[in-house]
Image (tube, helix red, strand yellow):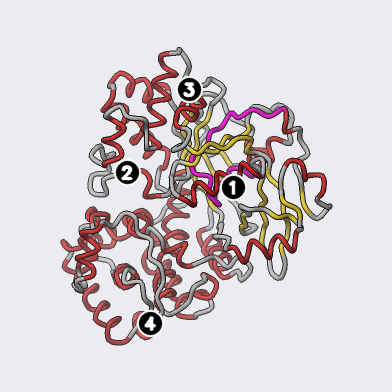
Amino acid sequence: MIQLSRATLASFGPTVTKPEYDRDRLQPGIVHFGVGNFHRVHQALAIETCLHHPGHENWAICGVGPMDGPAARAKAEAYRRQDNLYTVTELTSPAPRETRIVGAMVEYLHAPQSPEAVLALLADGATRIVSLTITEGGYNLDEASGAFRLDAPDIRHDLAGEPSRTVFGTIVTALARRRRAGLPPFTVMSCDNLQRNGDVTRRCVTGFARAVDPDLADWIDETGAFPNSMVDRIAPQVPEADRRRLAAATGVDDLVAATCETYTSWVVEDRFSAGRPELELAGVVFSDEVPAYVAVKGRLSNAAHMLMCYPSLLMGLRFVDEGMRQPGIVRLLHNFWDLDTRRLVAPPSGYSVDAFTATVVERFADPAIKDQLLRVAGDGASKIVVFHGKTIAQLIADGGDLTREAFLIACFGRYLRGVDDRGTPFEVFEPQIDMAERERLRAGDPLAVLDIAAFRGLSLRQSSRFLAAYRDISQRLEAHGTAETLAQLLV
């Protein structure tokens, strides 16, 4: 195995695809916050394709790590050692289909260590797009009102004029500098799984800006661009053992190797304030129907991911494909689509929802991906609201069957205990649940999960029908366990 770096690129054989453009000619025109696996196997690969075409030399990426801590610093060091190169392997059974070395990211900044360097880069006229994958919980929204929360501690810190800790504080500070310099605003492009993610991002950026300078907020609102987008690709975590197996198979010792499924999709509105790369070259679809694409993906695919992950975990499973080998889990998803959601979602023109859900089953069940259930489950307090909130509201308003949604919330409540039905513990990652809420959950009240702040906007306690279904299912789970309860609920 050979350590990946610029100096070793020529050492890798024909089984590994390498950049065929001149990296020395590249300049970053895109700054991306949150260089996790998803960005690296999705947006960055689209840019990688564009860079192989003339006229795209100024559209390379500078990655920014907004978080601090040992893992974040280790990632920054790994990128430094590898000259910002990394590999992406598309997984198919029984062996990797393709491994590619990606050179689209030419710089990486760790924001907590280099805050002024990040601001200077954003304020530079060469930066024309700032993109985000900061997770659904990273947008600092009040779940009940949908407003940007100005009372969050890090936001209050940024508003006090201290060096920015938050992505939105950094973006607004940089936009203020550009305005003073007579430069146009960059496009802010969310690639997170949110309904109308561009509109949400506009609300966050202008909400922060209005608290600083109303005229600045008006300028951003009037001249900036926040395109909505739909992004879709499964990018599992790569444990150290899997990283070593990939290195042995490919000969590339990559400290930050990424893997993904072969399926990929990106639909985006063609609204950019300072130009864009020719993303059509990478198969990106530009459409005015982005919200419809997002609704189909979020309420049918992402929602299905959330619905299947908690009962699968509680039954002692750890991978998504293992869950999909349980007939009851697959039937649960079909019940969810057939009885609850398909009628509530208006697809884009000419779009087959039946074909899409069939593809979802195939993708989730692919044994090559080995997507971790805990990855899907993490930050569920935010994800459930995003992917199930509208469905819950519509079912309550329409007098619909709340069985599947009550089962989801009841399983989520049991997941928060951090132990499955076999007594095996697992790690729970729920950053949106604070310590006071955790204490109430630990006290043993099965209804406590309905009162967490993230769920406040769902008004679960205000629906007598939801409460009745939730109590019934919670009691069944306690008495009979997850597998038997699921079998009892299936249609």
Cα distance, mark 2 to mark 4?
35 Å
Are discs 1 and 2 less than 8 Å apart at CB? no
Question: Could you tell me how far apart the alpha carbons at marks 1 and 4 are, in whole angstroms?
Answer: 36 Å
Q: Residue at x 76, y 32 (%)?
A: 22
- In what element is the residue under mark 4? loop
Q: Earlier in the sequence, mark 1 or mark 4?
A: 1
Which residue is labeled 2 in the image?
140
Q: Pointer 2 and pointer 4: residues touching (CB < 8 Å)?
A: no
Tell me the amino acid under the disc marked 2: Asn
Asked if the residues shown at circle 3 and circle 2 are in contact, with their CB atoms under 8 angstroms apart, the answer is: no
Q: Is residue 256 above or below residue 114?
A: below
On the image, numbered disc 4 is attached to which residue?
Answer: 423
Circles 1 and 4: CB atoms closer than 8 Å: no
What amino acid type should be assigned to the residue bearing mark 1?
Arg
Q: Position of residue 293 (x, y in %)?
A: 48, 49
Q: Earlier in the sequence, mark 3 or mark 2?
A: 3
* Residue lying at 71% horizontally and 44% vertically, measured from the top left: 5
**Residue 232's mark?**
none
Which image quarter holds the C terminus?
bottom left
Residue 348: x and y in percent read 49, 48
Of label 3 and label 4, which has the lower sequence position? 3
Looking at the picture, tell me which residue is in the foreground, 190 or 422: 422
Residue 40: mark in rendering: 1
Residue at image x 30%, y 27%? 161
The answer to whether the residue labelled 3 contacts the one labelled 1, judged by CB atoms less than 8 Å apart, is no
Looking at numbered disc 4 in the image, what kind of residue is underneath it?
Gly
Amino acid tagged 3: Ala
Question: What numbered label is drawn on residue 123?
Answer: 3
| Stretch of the chain drawn in magenta | 25-45
Q: Earlier in the sequence, mark 1 or mark 2?
A: 1
